[in-house]
Image (cartoon, grey):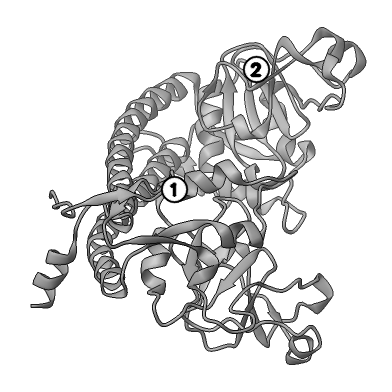
Amino acid sequence: MSFPKYPAYKDSGVEWIGDIPVGWVTTPIRSLAVSAPKSFTDGDWIESPFITDTGIRLLQTGNIGVGNYKEQGFRYISEETFDNLHCTEVKPGDLLICRLAEPVGRACIAPTLKEKMITSVDVAILKTSLYVSANYFNYVLSAASYLSFMESECRGGTRNRVSRSFLGSVRVPFPPLPEQQAIASFLDRECGKIDALIAEQERLIALLAEKRQGVISHAVTKGLNPNAPMKDSGIPWIGMVPEGWEVVRLSLLSDHISSGTTPDTDNESFYDGDICWVTTGELREAAIKNTTKKVTNLAFEKFSALQIYPPGTLLLAMYGATVGRVAWLETHAATNQACCALVFSKKIKMKFAFYTLLAAKKSLLLLSSGGGQPNINQEKVRSFRIPVPSLPEQNAIIDFLDSNMRELDSLVNNIEKALLVLKERRAALISAAVTGKIDVRAQSKARAA
């Protein structure tokens, strides 16, 4: 759908905004606030000892999405802490602007919750005046051109951020209130349609992921012959297996199981070499043909734990958020300490073991320890048992799964392309509407009529 333009435009004087309709102005973000103390202020610095299980709800940076509030995790402080620290209460409808990446400057409207609310220090609270539509400015602060500008201006060591004073000085387009409301209403409607399509496509991807996991799990534990006599494997995650199959520890299927290490990152002479070096972030259920970082021969001389693994080595992530991820090498490479490398014997095909560990991921995670950062160790990997059919059956299962995965991955790839188009359209529509590049007033009037 194409939309008309305004009759006349002028230069806004702000690069990320560009031309705006005649009759619009630009204004600093701070001027959107009511004329009252703490109408544009930072949230509160709440240290761990003040956190409780009930009381006043603490909204954190993770709750601030791009244009939407995200429910994730529950943290609270007591009324006593609220009073002692002179905290600023967040009211439903306040505009919350995150000064911390990523992306810097994103905003959402404070939700209506049962509890009283505060927010953390890296979130600015903007209590809007009567001449301001918080909904409209929530869209302004979601525009791709604005977020790109903020990204170029932010500073920081470990994480990028901007100061509240800088944030307050950022100029935004300011149409008359009726137009703010008309634009917000238009975007609510049109973005709602796009969001529904996005949600539908994301549900389809989730269903395909479930199907993918189901196809893999059935093939590596039940085989391809639906009429094969079965026996109990004795392993809960495997269940029944064909009678001719074995259930074997990984240590008995591997010629070599070990990991690597991380050379001192402060010593530049250990890096930018010619030897591929794998980290767990590169384990993405696919072949590894190259790596982001490479190490030098000097690193191998200084760190005995480093070793080069051959193509065909299976890698399993043992630590942190990536635990359970797998990939295989199609080049010679070393690894860090978080990767468990398995060089298999002739009893099992690497690709069959790869698919089997994909099927076993939930069971591997149950073996992990460490609370917020779950870990598994090499001993647990060595003792982990998997089903092992004959080599001809392994080859048949690999061919079957390779073919099915290509089909499923192609479907997912097409859906992801469609999702990208939808998200790009949504972003372009928001940017065009909030900066006046399109005139949506007629659509809003027609809708109201």
What element does badge 1 sit on? loop
Foreground label between 1 and 2: 1
Neighbour tally class for label 2: few under 14, some 14-19, many 20 plus, Cα within 10 Å = few
In depth, the one of 272 and 168 nearer the eye is 168
Q: Which amino acid does label 2 sit on?
A: Ser
Residue at position x 61%, y 63% in the image: 61
In percent of width and height, residue 235 lies at: 59, 48
The residue carrying mark 2 is: 345
Q: Looking at the picture, does residue 442 appear above or below residue 400? A: below
Q: Which mark is residue 14?
A: 1
In percent of width and height, residue 96 lies at: 54, 69
In depth, the one of 172 and 272 nearer the eye is 172
In percent of width and height, residue 137 lies at: 41, 66
Residue at position x 34%, y 28% in the image: 406
Q: Quote the CA–CA distance across marks 1 and 2.
A: 65 Å
Residue at position x 54%, y 64% in the image: 64
In depth, the one of 173 and 430 nearer the eye is 173
Taking the image as shown, residue 25 lies to the left or right of residue 302, namely left
Residue 348 visible in the picture = no
Tell me where residue 261 sits by quadrant. Answer: top right
Farthest residue toward the right? 302
Taking the image as shown, residue 425 lies to the left or right of residue 365, namely left
In percent of width and height, residue 221 lies at: 47, 40
Residue 393 visible in the picture = yes
